[in-house]
Amino acid sequence: MAKRVFVVDDETNIADTLAVILRNEGYQATAFYNAQSALEQAGDRGPDLIISDVMMPGMSGIEMAMLVKERHPECKILLFSGQASTLNLLETVRERGHNFELLAKPVHPTDLLARVAEAGLPGAF
């Protein structure tokens, strides 16, 4: 069964592009344009992996990641951001017991796929 991956970014072209790249590698990837809709879709059977922008209107990617991990501790999380201030946010989250991986924006497709594989979700092909 293909691994379920949620790609969350308020920049729709980024979310859509990353989801297409992942689908081309055999993942069941879905793009979401805000954290709340991704959280609602996680439901009872959460995704295997969430790849999310950190800074988004409303709920941040970090807040969403912490909520998903509470409900689905087995879900892997990869966060990405183009802002240096994100490192400070991640340090605060680490103090609360969460250790999320961070990718720098823009993320190259090869780097993205390598990090997904490192998270324990090798491609389906």
Image (cartoon, helix red, strand yellow):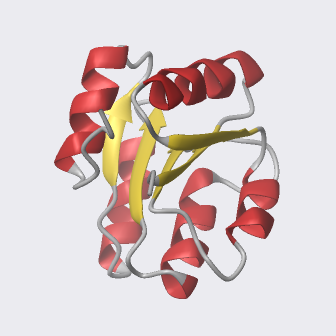
Q: Nearer the viewer, residue 58 or 114?
A: 114
Image-based side of 91 in relation to 122, left or right: right
Residue at the spot 47% in from the left edge and 30% down from the top edge:
22
Image-based side of 94 in relation to 23, left or right: left
Residue at the spot 55% in from the left edge and 44% down from the top edge:
28
Q: Look at the picture and state if 59 lies above or below 27.
A: below
**Quarter of the image that includes the N terminus:** bottom left
Q: How many dots with numbers?
A: 0
Image-based side of 111 in relation to 12, left or right: left
Q: Nearer the viewer, residue 37 or 113?
A: 113
Residue 61 in view here = yes
Q: Residue furthest left?
A: 118
Image-based side of 62 in relation to 80, left or right: right
Q: Look at the picture and state if 88 lies above or below 29.
A: below
Q: Nearer the viewer, residue 119 or 104?
A: 119
Q: Position of residue 115 (x, y in %)?
A: 25, 38
Residue at the spot 43% in from the left edge and 69% down from the top edge:
75
Give the quarter of the image for residue 40. bottom right
Q: Position of residue 119 (x, y in %)?
A: 24, 52
Q: Position of residue 69 (x, y in %)?
A: 48, 77
Q: Look at the picture and state if 22 lies above or below 60.
A: above
Q: Position of residue 120 (x, y in %)?
A: 22, 55
Residue 53 in view here = no
